[in-house]
Amino acid sequence: MARRKKIYEGKAKILYEGPEPGTLIQYFKDDATAFNAEKKAVIEGKGVLNNRLSEFFMLGLQNIGVPTHFIRRLNMREQLVRQVEIIPLEVIVRNFAAGSMAKRLGMEEGTALPRPIVEFSYKNDALGDPLVPEEYIVAFGWASQQDMDDIVSIALRVNDFMSGVMHGVGIKLVDFKIEIGRIWDNDFHRLVVADEISPDSCRLWDVETGRKLDKDVFRRDLGSLTDAYTEVARRLGVLPSNVTHRPRPTLIN
Ligand code: TMP
């Protein structure tokens, strides 16, 4: 394969120059990290599953009119996406208390919240992605007030969509994180859902048993991450049900 230009390498993905201006190729690695990369592992097949699952969610969002950076999946590990200017925020939506919220407020994990809560972390590994109020974001110019209003509206639409899709396959959407990008058109920009939506960036609990089907399996050493993600993919019909640990390229491509 011809050598191509790497634009950016993150913890779970690599971005390469795309075939046309304004496009990028997003490559999903098998690397898993947690606690700001203090814990690391290579989980065979994770990238393939997340590529497929992110495609599924992004296409679903586009179908209900939520703009995303996704153009099309290219192969098992790569998708073609629009190049965006990433807003340096992790936009988190919570339906039930878990993770850092449960810890911060001393709440039991799984407690239903009175309504979906949207919160923001400043994307900065050196600082450990600190939680920031909207006022900081606007005051420091990371996003305008108009952007923030649009981001909250997008985040809640993603939450409604994802909660419904997951509920349909017996999975509770506890919380998730998205990232938002700007696409510029002369002096104007529009906001789109960027990065990925996958079990790496959601908390997903089986409705019946409470079994965790997301990256907490890795963070908390609860078993096989591939098994958990494969279960999500299988329930959503993203993978044929006979594909388990090592998806065969001919079956899933
Ligand atoms: P938290 O409870 O640890 O703050 O996580 C909230 C949600 O955000 C959860 O679904 C996991 C996701 N998340 C990421 O996608 N990336 C991260 O770096 C962190 C800390 C959380």
Image (cartoon, helix red, strand yellow):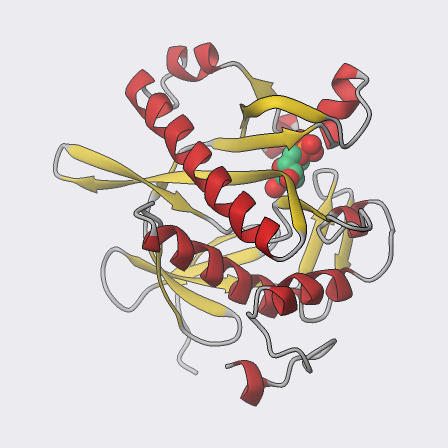
Ligand 1's image quarter is top right
**Left or right: residue 224 compared with residue 253:** right
Measuring from the top left, give residue 85's x and y in whole percent.
34, 40
Residue 208 seen from this side:
yes
Residue 123 seen from this side:
no
In the foreground, 60 or 183? 60
In the foreground, 225 or 94? 94
Res 81 quadrant in image: bottom left
Measuring from the top left, give residue 252's x and y in whole percent.
55, 81
In this rendering, the count of numbered labels is: 0
Farthest residue, direction left: 186
For the N terminus, give its image quadrant: bottom left
> Looking at the image, which residue is at 16% across and 33% down?
188
Res 147 quadrant in image: top left
> Looking at the image, which residue is at 47% across and 12% down?
136
In the foreground, 76 or 169? 169
Q: Looking at the image, is 107 positioned above or below residue 49?
A: above
> Looking at the image, which residue is at 41% across and 38% down?
180
Measuring from the top left, give residue 206's x and y in whole percent.
74, 51
Q: Looking at the image, is 177 positioned above or below residue 137?
A: below
Measuring from the top left, give residue 68's x and y in whole percent.
35, 49
